[in-house]
Amino acid sequence: MGLQLRPNCEYCDKDLAPDAPDAMICTYECTFCPACVATLRNVCPNCGGGFAPRPIRPKNEWRPGLSIEKQPASTKRVHLSYSVDDIAAHSARIAGIPVGER
Ligand SMILES: [Zn+2]
Ligand SMILES: [Zn+2]
């Protein structure tokens, strides 16, 4: 188990390689690029939570079975199911609330 490491931004569909230093995720692993996180005002369109940088899985197998080779990133692209207007309203409703109080 571990993070899925999804291959793309769920909003703009930009590729986000497993070792991308700028991929952002919410606690449910909804995954976005930094430009979209800014557009979304740090509000996940799915859960309403905030984002944090996605950790990078090690290339080297420092411990048995634990590396990007042994546990590869997901290749299943994910896309939002909400309209642009819906997402904007969702962000506007939630963005002013500190992430710890959402
Ligand atoms: Zn994006
Ligand atoms: Zn989320």
Image: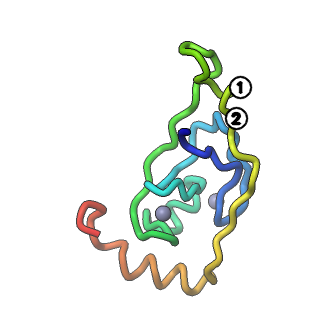
Determine crowd level at label 2: few under 14, some 14-19, many 20+ residues with C-alpha closer than 10 A: few
- For ligand 1, give the image quadrant: bottom right
In the displayed structure image, the side of residue 48 where residue 29 appears, left or right? right
Disc on res. 69: 1
Residue 59 lies in quadrant: top right
Q: Are marks 1 and 2 in contact (CB under 8 Å)?
A: yes
Q: Total marks drawn?
A: 2
Name the foreground residue: 11 vs 61.
Answer: 61
Element under label 2? loop
Q: Which residue occupies 70% across, 45% down? A: 74
**Which residue type does callout 2 highlight?**
Pro
Horizontal placement of 78 versus 50: left or right? right
* 18 in relation to 75, above or below: above
Closer to us: 53 or 79: 79
Q: Relative to residue 15, is residue 60 depicted above or below?
A: above
Q: Is residue 35 left or right of residue 14?
A: left
The residue located at (61%, 21%) in the rendering is 65
Residue 102, horizontal then vertical, whole percent:
29, 69
Mark on residue 3?
Answer: none
The residue shown at (63%, 83%) is: 83
User: Would you identify the image quadrant in which residue 33 lies?
Assistant: bottom right
Q: Which residue is mark 2?
A: 72
Q: Position of residue 97 (x, y in %)?
A: 28, 71
Residue 30 x %, y %: 55, 58
8 relative to 22 in the view: left or right: right
Q: Decide: is 100 above or below 75.
A: below
Residue at image position (45%, 69%) is 47
